[in-house]
Image: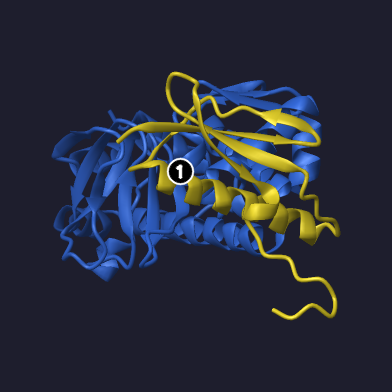
């Protein structure tokens, strides 16, 4: 059930069988949600964290007129809000972008897990720091990359992150998002995203159609994105 | 909500909208088109050019064009010396 999560952890850290069993024991509930459902609202009191098992989720904030900015996409294996373990409420919302299966880890179970296995506390701390690194890279994209480079960068990031949990290949990956969803990630409009995707397609770099990303020229995609996966900390020193 | 398709025509050809957007009415679709044009022009300006040759056709699910928004209708342009 939490195989993707274990793959994500083991991509960066050694996890013993005993630690694996302890993590599994920390999860006592699984929920299913349809697409486009806000499952955590900003400000509400939280006593649990949400682990995404299948599907795509995001963190977002809205302005008064409804303009939405997605701050991070979450893929299978990610905790969407392990930071609520210490914050106890969020400053943003969490929603599903595709049908999603999530596991609930009660904060009291997380505390028990971390008390029994202090190294896991460090490993989950690493995980929230990794989220912060992703946010910094998105800040760079939203502030400084142009539309084409920003879009290319998002696809490069998703290829890496989905690849870690076995959901991407060298030539592409499934991505059950709409152009409107991408626009909300990229700070663009759906119309503009459509045009950028046309340019990428006509340049023979990438095609996004019907929920599938086909990477036609990875080297060129990486080049225009100025993508450097260092911020994903794929090979950290042991904790 | 009805589905609107916003096809962009400009110098580089046509970007057809194959996905569509769920919007309350045609007015909302027009506002979306204006926002889209502004977003494209903004990116062009950042690269040092601006091209008003283009339009967005708003179509319904049957493919019928309900309205057209021209790029130059999405922004007001003031020439040098002209009062605003």
Viewer-nearest residue: B84 or A219:
B84
Q: Position of residue A145 (x, y in %)?
A: 71, 56
Say whether residue A77 is left or right of residue A178: left
Most distant residue in the front direction: B83
Q: Position of residue A184 (x, y in %)?
A: 49, 50
- What color is chain B drawn in? yellow
Q: Compared to A215, does A12 lie above or below?
A: below
Q: Position of residue A161 (x, y in %)?
A: 54, 38
**Position of the N terminus of chain A by quadrant:** top left
Instruction: Name the residue located 79 percent from the left edge and 77 percent from the top edge.
Output: B82
Q: Is residue A98 visible?
A: yes
Q: Secondary structure at mark 1?
A: helix
Q: Residues within 10 Å of mark 1 (few under 14, many from 20)?
A: many
Which chain is painted in blue?
A: A
Q: Is residue A233 visible?
A: no
Viewer-nearest residue: A116 or A225:
A225
Say whether residue A200 is left or right of residue A9: right
Q: Quadrant of residue A97?
A: top left
Instruction: Name the residue located 39 percent from the left edge and 56 percent from the top edge.
Output: A60
Q: Compared to A77, does A105 lie above or below?
A: below
Viewer-nearest residue: A215 or A87:
A215
Q: Which residue is mark 1?
A: B29
Scheme of colours in the image: by chain
């Amino acid at each position: 059930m939490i195989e993707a999560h274990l793959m994500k952890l083991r991509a960066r850290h050694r996890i013993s069988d005993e630690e694996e069993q302890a993590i599994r024991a920390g999860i006592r509930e699984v929920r299913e949600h349809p697409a486009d459902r806000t499952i955590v609202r900003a400000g509400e009191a939280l006593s649990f964290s949400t682990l995404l098992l299948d599907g795509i989720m995001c963190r977002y904030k809205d302005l008064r007129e409804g303009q939405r900015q997605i701050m991070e996409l979450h893929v299978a294996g990610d905790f969407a809000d392990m930071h609520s373990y210490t914050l106890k409420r969020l400053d943003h919302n969490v929603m599903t972008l595709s049908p999603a299966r999530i596991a609930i880890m009660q904060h009291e179970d997380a505390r028990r897990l971390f008390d029994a296995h202090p190294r896991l506390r460090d490993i989950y701390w690493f995980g929230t720091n990794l989220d912060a690194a992703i946010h910094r890279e998105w800040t760079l994209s939203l502030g400084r990359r142009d539309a084409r480079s920003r879009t290319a960068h998002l696809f490069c990031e998703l290829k890496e992150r989905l690849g870690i949990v076995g959901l991407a290949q060298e030539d592409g990956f499934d991505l059950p998002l709409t152009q409107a969803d991408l626009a909300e990630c990229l700070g663009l409009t759906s119309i503009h995203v459509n045009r950028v995707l046309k340019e990428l397609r006509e340049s023979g770099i990438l095609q996004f159609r019907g929920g599938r990303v086909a990477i036609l020229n990875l080297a060129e995609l990486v080049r225009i994105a100025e993508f450097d996966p260092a911020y994903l900390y794929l090979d950290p020193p042991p904790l | 909500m009805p589905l609107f398709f916003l096809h962009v025509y400009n110098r580089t050809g046509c970007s057809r909208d194959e996905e569509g957007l769920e919007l309350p009415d045609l007015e909302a679709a027009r506002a979306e088109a204006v926002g889209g044009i502004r977003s494209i022009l903004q990116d062009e300006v950042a690269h040092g050019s601006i091209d008003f040759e283009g339009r967005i056709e708003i179509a319904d699910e049957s493919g019928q064009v309900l309205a057209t928004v021209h790029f130059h209708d999405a922004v007001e342009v003031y020439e040098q010396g002209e009062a605003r």
